[in-house]
Image (spheres, grey):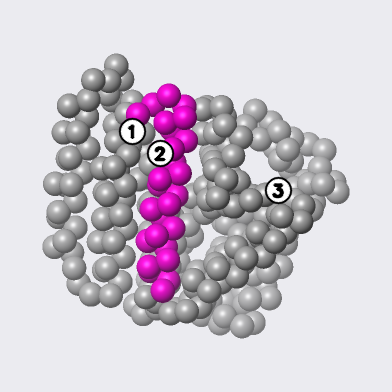
């Protein structure tokens, strides 16, 4: 428990610093973090007996994030058209492998980019949705995500009786889920007094979206780990598991929240 608490403290400090230290630090940090998450994904898949094209997958994941994130700073759409060339290298590389399941390898290579890169792209784009860098939205997202996790954990321990999705996550309960929604909504109400870009109703709506889709992301990641018979996605965070374990709630929630913000801002 002590190791978990110390790791959690430094994790929060690093995450807050990545948001508060300006746009360039924000973009660079999430580019690096995304690459580590993708590497962790491929490592897990290899442990499950598959052989994704790790090197070409990592290069393409890096370029996908880099090219799309660059749009937040300058018009660089022409660079995106290099991606079909680099992505085709994944297919070409598989041609030269002697693998009994080449399309399984291809599928996991592209799934890694979809699962570990695309959600962080949407999270990164939140900070620039108004046209210039504004840390309030990604900061608010993280606060509500952490509030949901904390609320779900505490409510689940105190009142948890009814299993939410026992097949994939035996410890999750409906009581914990609603506790997470409540605490996340309270955090949203408090933030609405400081971050006035959105009304309190919009902040609470985002909190509900994060709670619902963050929980689904957690379940999806649990389903993935169970399918390859691993407990934690890695050991980079002592007491907390891997990076994918820490950001599973972001996987589905970030794209949904960005879509919500896009439509209400337009």
The residue lying at 63 percent from left, 76 percent from top is 191
How far separated are the C-alphas under marks 3 and 2? 30 Å
* Of residues 47 and 259, the one drawn nearer to the viewer in this rendering: 47
Q: Report helix, strand or loop for mark 2.
A: helix
Q: Is residue 197 above or below residue 182?
A: below
User: How many other residues sit within 10 Å of disc 2, few (<14), some (14-19) or many (≥20)?
Assistant: many
Image position of 94 (left or right of 254): left
What percent of the width, then of the height, locates residue 193? 64, 82
Seen from this angle, which residue lies furthest right? 158
Seen from this angle, which residue lies furthest top? 100
Q: Are marks 3 and 2 in contact (CB under 8 Å)?
A: no
Residue 132, quarter of picture: bottom left
Which label is found at residue 206? none
Q: Is residue 222 above or below residue 122?
A: above
The residue lying at 45 percent from left, 49 percent from top is 37
Which label is found at residue 42? 2
Residue 208 visible: no
Residue under numbered circle 1 = 52
Instruction: Name the front one of labels 1 and 3.
Output: 1
Answer whether residue 41 is magenta in the image. Answer: yes
Which label is found at residue 177? 3
* Of residues 67 and 231, the one drawn nearer to the viewer in this rendering: 231
Residue 222 visible: yes
Q: Is residue 203 above or below residue 51?
A: below
Q: Are marks 2 and 1 in contact (CB under 8 Å)?
A: yes
Q: Quadrant of the C terminus?
A: bottom left
Image position of 85 (left or right of 201): left
Q: Are marks 1 and 3 in contact (CB under 8 Å)?
A: no
Magenta-drawn segment: 25-52
Magenta segment's dominant SS is helix
């Amino acid at each position: 428990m002590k190791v978990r608490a110390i790791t959690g403290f430094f994790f929060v400090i690093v995450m807050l610093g990545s948001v508060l230290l300006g746009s360039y630090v924000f973009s660079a940090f999430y580019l690096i973090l995304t690459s580590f998450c993708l590497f962790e994904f491929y490592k897990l898949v290899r442990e499950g007996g598959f052989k994704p094209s790790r090197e070409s997958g990592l290069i393409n994941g890096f370029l996908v994030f880099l090219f799309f994130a660059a749009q937040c700073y300058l018009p660089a759409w022409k660079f995106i058209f290099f991606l079909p060339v680099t992505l085709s290298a994944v297919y070409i590389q598989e041609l030269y492998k002697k693998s009994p399941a080449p399309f399984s390898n291809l599928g996991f290579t592209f799934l890694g980019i979809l699962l570990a890169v695309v959600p962080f792209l949407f999270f990164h784009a939140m900070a620039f949705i108004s046209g210039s860098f504004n840390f309030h939205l990604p900061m608010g997202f993280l606060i509500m995500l952490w509030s949901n996790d904390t609320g779900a954990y505490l409510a689940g321990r105190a009142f948890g009786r009814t299993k939410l999705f026992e097949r994939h996550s035996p410890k999750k309960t409906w009581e914990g889920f609603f506790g997470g929604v409540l605490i996340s909504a309270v955090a949203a109400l408090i933030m609405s007094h400081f971050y006035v870009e959105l009304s309190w109703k919009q902040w609470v709506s985002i909190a509900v979206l994060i709670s619902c889709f963050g929980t689904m992301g957690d379940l999806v990641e649990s389903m993935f780990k169970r399918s390859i018979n691993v407990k934690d996605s890695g050991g980079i965070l002592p007491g907390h598991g891997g990076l994918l374990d820490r950001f599973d709630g972001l996987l589905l929630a970030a794209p949904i929240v960005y879509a919500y913000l896009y439509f209400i801002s337009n």
